Image: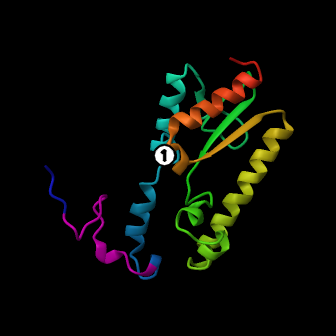
Amino acid sequence: MVIRNPLIDPIGVPRRFYRARCRGRDPAVTSRIMSRIRCRNTLPERLLGSAMRRLGIRLRKQVRAVGKPDFGLKKFRLAVFVDGDFWHGHEWALKGYSGPEAMLRRYPKYWREKLRRNARRDEFVTGTLRAEGWTVIRFWASDVKKDADRCAREVYAVMKGHGWV
């Protein structure tokens, strides 16, 4: 059994550096925290990947297409994205805010703009892929964590509807 120090978070950063959302935080600490955020092979992606494999769906990871879908098949032009709740603007629903703007008010200007840019980029990527004839499926990470099998069945249903399975 590992005994954790309550004054240090799971990645080893002392809690005293967690003052008022980035203000006053040592840049080295911020850099270390941000470097630990994964962009691929995240837990929700692994959960969805295993659920799809259990159903017999074999999709490629990190497909080379516009927006770099988490899973996809170029042959069938199918792209599946697993969007993180914070980075792609869904955290407001999980925390009980009335909308994304209500949640964003509590963040510094940089983060408000960053999250808005991410949402605009998601819309652009989805539109571009659809214009090129791709079928695009997007899941929130929280939905995948809750029920990865349901998400995999949704992918299966889309593939079956197109006659790909």
Identified at 52% across, 67% down, the residue is 95
Relative image position of residue 69 (x, y in whole percent): 65, 39
Q: In this picture, which residue range is highlighted in magenta?
A: 5-20
- The x, y position of residue 133, in whole percent, is 84, 33
Give the image quarter of residue 24.
Answer: bottom left
Examine the structure image and report whether residue 13 is included in the region drawn in magenta: yes
Question: In the drawing, does residue 31 fall left or right of residue 59?
Answer: left
Q: Is residue 42 visible?
A: no
Residue holding disc 1: 146
Give SS at disc 1.
Answer: helix
Q: Amino acid at mark 1?
A: Lys
Q: Is residue 126 left or right of residue 68?
A: right
Point out residue 100 in the picture as x, y percentages from the top left corner: 65, 69
- The chosen color scheme is rainbow
Magenta-colored stretch includes residue 139: no
- Quadrant for the C terminus, please: top right
The residue at the far right in this view is: 131
> Pointer 1: residues within 10 angstroms few (<14), some, or many (20+)?
few
Residue visible at 47% across and 49% down in the picture: 38
Residue visible at 30% across and 77% down? 16
Q: Is residue 3 visible?
A: yes
| Count of numbered labels shown in the rendering | 1
